[in-house]
Image (spheres, rainbow, N blue to C red):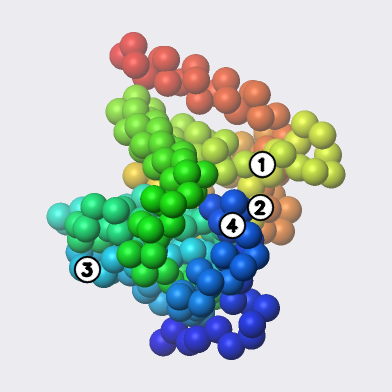
Amino acid sequence: MSTTLAQPAARSLRGIKLFECLSDPELKAVEGQCRFRCYAKAETLLDKGSLTREVFFVLRGAAAAVTFSPAGREVTLGIIRTGDMFGELAAIDQEPRSATVTAMEPTDVAIMPAELFRDLLMKHAPMAFGVLQRLATIVRTTGIRIMELATLQAAQRVYAELLRMAQPDAAVPGLWVVRPLPPMHEIASLTGTTRETVNRAVSQLYPSGLLKRKGRNLFIMEREKLMEIVQSLQVHHGRR
């Protein structure tokens, strides 16, 4: 069961980019109208189809937004990390929840009433624009994944997803890293394939040195070469 965050230091929205435009007194007033909860790993934060309207802001941890096919197959729509939000669609359009959200690890959230969320967007243009940017990113990412499902084989979809996950390594210029590498079944759900296929796709690039695993992290040693592999196979597959 979720628990209330007790420590005042943890009950702050200051780390959420959306609220950067608010002064400290304004932010304190907003925080006073939110609930702060901690969810255990694998605990459900939202159920698809529910009629709740609150907006969630992740203060610490990570969660997965998933849906299910008619046959019961789980499809991951996205990973929600520290600083992200979710639940804004239902708050805006008053429709049922479009996905189930489950904690991937212990996750602290701030839960904002829908009315307050909408009022803030109406009063603060930078916040409204921030939500528009987030929704635009979701639309673009969804379009890319649909294209990849239609044009790429499973292994190439895995590589494309790893490229999106990777960030520049601050310690080594030119090196990119997926930190930490999600479990194979989560990557499989994101790419519409199986855990075994993901493991095989990643493992087959280890001997060439293109990918290297160190602890929980996956290093992409030559990002441009991996991009070329995806793009060349995409063109080849599209011409078949």
Q: Quadrant of residue 47?
A: bottom left
Residue for badge 4: 22
Q: Classify mark 4: residues with Cα within 10 Å, few (<14), some (14-19) or many (20+).
A: some
Q: Amino acid at mark 2?
A: Arg
Residue 50 marker: 3
Q: Is residue 226 left or right of residue 142?
A: right
Q: Is residue 141 above or below residue 41?
A: above
Going from the N terminus, do you reach mark 4 or mark 2 first?
4
Q: How far apart are labels 4 and 2 at the CA level? A: 31 Å
Q: Amino acid at mark 1?
A: Gln
Q: How far apart are labels 4 and 3 at the CA level? A: 31 Å
Residue for badge 2: 179
Secondary structure category for the residue under label 3 = loop
Residue for badge 1: 167
Q: Circles 4 and 2: CB distance less than 8 Å? A: no
Front position in the image: 131 or 180: 131
Q: Circles 2 and 1: CB distance less than 8 Å? A: yes
- Quadrant assignment for the N terminus: bottom left
Going from the N terminus, do you reach mark 2 or mark 1 first?
1
Going from the N terminus, do you reach mark 1 or mark 4 first?
4
Q: Classify mark 3: residues with Cα within 10 Å, few (<14), some (14-19) or many (20+).
A: some
Camera-side mark, 4 or 2: 4
Q: Circles 3 and 2: CB distance less than 8 Å? A: no
Going from the N terminus, do you reach mark 3 or mark 2 first?
3
Q: Residue furthest top?
A: 239
Secondary structure category for the residue under label 2 = loop
Q: How far apart are labels 2 and 1 at the CA level? A: 8 Å
Q: Amino acid at mark 3?
A: Ser
- Quadrant assignment for the C terminus: top left
